[in-house]
Amino acid sequence: MTEITVEKTAEDPASKSLRVTVPVDRVREAEAKALKYYVQRARLPGFRPGKAPAAVVRKRFGDAIRQSVLEEVVREGWETARTAESLKPITDPSIRNLKFEDGSPIEFELLVEVRPDITLERTGGFRLERQVPPVTDAMVDEQLARLQEQKAAWIPVEGAVPAPGQMVRVEVAPLDEAGAAGASQPYDLVLGQNQAIPDLEERIMTLRPGEQADSEVKFPDDHPDESRRGQTRRVRVTLHDVKRQELPALDDAFAREVGDFEHLDALRAAVRQDLEREAGREADAQVRQALVQQIVEANNVPAPESLVHRLMHGYAEMYQVPPAQLEQFEQQFHEVAAAQVRRDLVLDAVVESQNLRATEGDLDQRVAQLAGARGVSAGELYGSLQKANRLPELERAITEEKVYAWLLQQSTIDEVKP
């Protein structure tokens, strides 16, 4: 039997384009196999099961047989290409330029994304600075103010127009050309926080609770919905009630309400400690980022465009970017995605060269630690992580910790006082 042929037509470090040709005799074999399958299972009027003539079955199930042939030869062609080119695909291949004509070979192109083979000649000997900014009293006060806002009560305001920072409950109904109101939509929003378009907020701040007014509002030019940008609408606004925020006193009673603190000084000390830990984590993150950047530059690590595009596509889906804004989004995030690709390639290369992948024991130990902190059994937490498909994410996090620990040992980190 004639062999399937594979011809490389294009490649970069992270993708390959291959032209696959499946010879006629292999196509006929796949057709015979598919036809036999349908003959044995066909249920056609006037024929006993499995006894319908092949010509009748072929006529009745022609499209299904053709689809079965395509699936069979594409699968076999892909297996042949993967073996012949020693591919390490990271996703299923894309099929393009398929040619399938009776009596002719089947031809198609495979676009395959592969994991680039990156060899890092230098992974150590770098010198980096770690600087932890001090936590100021103003930063502690700002965090305490946020806690106050979280515990604040909303008190009704009677007989006065609302002001920025106050919460309102309104109904907004569109008006047609004749002035008839459509279905109203209720909203609860805090004024001055860009939760409504400016014209609408300004109109609301002219009303007292229980009042209603018709108004023309204009959507801003940077409105998220492109179809509404710059357009005007006539609406009927009804203000139902207004509430002002009343912050609790910052005292020992507040500290006890927030957590297990005997007095305000204890809460303030805990807040400062949390901020200091966060500052340390941020300093560590900056050191890791700087180290990866130096490794990238020292080894001239590429950012293959196919991987960059794939990552940006994932970003666009995650942020639900409208198709009309996709080009602008990709231009804006291209360098961010390229840096992420280079980082991932560096980490993956170190994982492979130093055998630092998280083990099953590492995963069990981490789950046990997390379970102890949450007050649940390790088995219960493991089951919930598995159900939520979070175990691969945890495994990746452990692997990265091991990689960074190894990399930092190869370089010098100087502690710098701000």
Image (cartoon, rainbow, N blue to C red):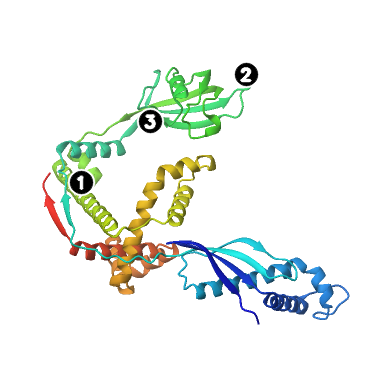
Label 1, residues with CA under 10 Å away: few <14, some 14-19, many ≥20: some
Where's the N terminus, which quadrant?
bottom right
- Inspect this view and state whether residue 367 appears: no
Q: Is residue 63 left or right of residue 341?
A: right
Looking at the image, the residue that sits furthest to the left is 417
Gap in Å between the C-alphas at discs 2 and 3?
30 Å
Tell me the kind of residue under disc 2. Gly
Residue 359 falls in image quadrant:
bottom left
Closer to the chain start, of discs 3 and 1, is 3
Residue 255 placed where, x, y %? Answer: 20, 42
Gap in Å between the C-alphas at discs 2 and 1?
55 Å
Residue 385 falls in image quadrant:
bottom left
Gap in Å between the C-alphas at discs 3 and 1?
26 Å
Tell me the kind of residue under disc 3. Gln
Tell me the kind of residue under disc 1. Leu
Q: Which residue is mark 2?
A: 179
Residue 360 placed where, x, y %? Answer: 34, 73
Q: Is residue 12 left or right of residue 163?
A: right
